[in-house]
Amino acid sequence: MENADCILEGRQVLEIGEIMGILPHRYPFLLIDRVVEIERKTRIVAIKNVTINEPFFQGHFPGFPIMPGVLVVEAIAQTGGVLLMPEVPDREKKLMVFTGIERAKFRRPVVPGDQLRIEVKVLNWKPIAARMVGEATVNGKLACEATVMCRLVPRLDQETAQETAQETAGAAAEPEPALVSESVNQE
């Protein structure tokens, strides 16, 4: 996949505003603060400054705050997204979503005050899917590693997304006919 207008061309550093121009994520779910190294289509390094102000620390865990491991894996995926989404010519019409996580291992807790260094390498990149391996370190020590798979899907416009959400909510509110008949037969 090639995008002649790729915004990463010749870049090594991306600030938060530029990251937000690539990823759809927003606070509190935007989990990278800065990109410090880029090798187009190959490798990227991002930074996440972990502070006590993160909303997940209120409940994970009171008195012993630890960044949830699944969010560290999400930060790995977001870092990969910053590397690959600019390569997609019509990226404003697409979302990159998880399709799998393999070999996720958590080696040490990530706590407030840590600076997470996230390095992601592309293993396989095709027009609609990618496979990447990532490592998150703190002070040079491995905190998390994982292989993530993702896929490009069409991004719904706001109106279509709301209609889909309403249809899904309506379907969830209606009991399945088989369940209704079973409960009637039991009486």
Image (tube, rainbow, N blue to C red):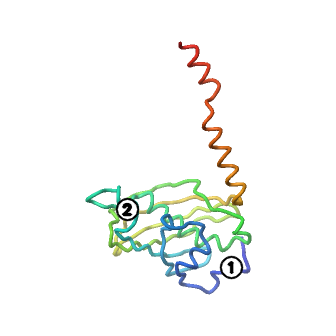
Amino acid type of the residue that numbered disc 2 sits on in the rendered structure: Met
* Vertical order, 4 against 147 (above or below): below
Q: Is residue 90 left or right of residue 179?
A: right
Identified at 49% across, 76% down, the residue is: 45
Mark 1 element type: loop
Identify the residue under disc 2.
67
Identified at 53% across, 75% down, the residue is: 44
* Vertical order, 45 against 172 (above or below): below
| Quarter of the rendering occupied by the N terminus | bottom right
Q: Label for residue 6?
A: 1
Image spot of residue 112 (x, y percent) = 33, 69
Earlier residue among tags 2 and 1: 1
Q: Nearer the viewer, residue 53 or 131?
A: 53
Residue contact between numbered discs 2 and 1, judged by CB atoms under 8 Å: no
Identified at 25% across, 59% down, the residue is: 63
Image spot of residue 151 (x, y percent) = 64, 58
Which image quarter: residue 14? bottom right
Q: Nearer the viewer, residue 166 or 76?
A: 166
Image spot of residue 69 (x, y percent) = 40, 58
Q: Is residue 160 left or right of residue 84?
A: right
